[in-house]
């Protein structure tokens, strides 16, 4: 799923740089390369790649990351991948 892009400007992903300890787990668990860690801090490279799976937040011990998993159109996109049908969440 590298190179995947979600819908523009709808992700609930938030990163608090003040809480980040730079452990890099967010970068390791994210399937879409949303994060990059350098200089001891994580940064969001491209928020629109986030599909709100929640893996980053679940693995962030200092709770620097928050995301509401499974909301918006992410569920529809995943359902479309699984079923092979065109994703539809009814929001458009």
Image (spheres, rainbow, N blue to C red):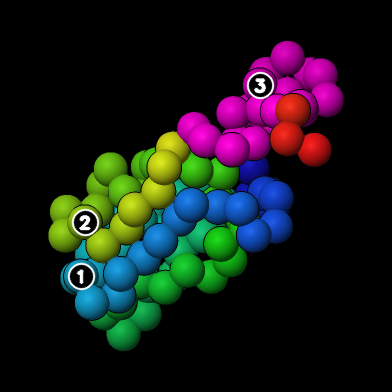
Residue appearing at x 56%, y 44% in the figure: 51
Magenta range is: 70-89
Residue 84: percent from the left, percent from the top?
79, 18
Asked if the residues shown at circle 2 and circle 1 are in contact, with their CB atoms under 8 angstroms apart, the answer is yes
Q: Nearer the viewer, residue 11 or 38?
A: 11
Label 1 SS: loop
Which residue is the site of mark 2? Answer: 63
Please tell me whether residue 58 is drawn above or below residue 85 in the rendered image: below
Answer with mark 3 or mark 1, whichever residue precedes in sequence: 1
Please tell me whether residue 63 is drawn above or below residue 71 in the rendered image: below
Residue appearing at x 30%, y 75% in the figure: 17
Task: Tell whether 85 sits left or right of 51.
Answer: right
Please tell me whether residue 75 is drawn above or below residue 34 in the rendered image: above
Q: CA distance from mark 3 to mark 1?
A: 34 Å
Q: CA distance from mark 2 to mark 3?
A: 29 Å
Q: Is residue 18 visible?
A: yes
Residue 41 among magenta residues: no
Which residue is the site of mark 1? Answer: 19
Residue 36: percent from the left, percent from the top?
44, 70
């Amino acid at each position: 799923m590298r190179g995947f892009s979600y819908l523009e400007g709808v992700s609930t992903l938030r990163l608090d740089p003040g809480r980040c300890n730079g452990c890099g787990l967010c970068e390791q668990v994210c399937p879409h390369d949303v994060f990059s860690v350098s200089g001891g801090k994580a940064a969001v490279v491209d928020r629109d790649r986030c599909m709100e799976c929640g893996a980053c937040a679940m693995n962030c011990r200092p709770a620097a990351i928050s995301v509401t998993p499974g909301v918006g159109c992410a569920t529809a996109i995943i359902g479309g991948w699984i079923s092979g049908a065109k994703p539809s969440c009814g929001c458009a």
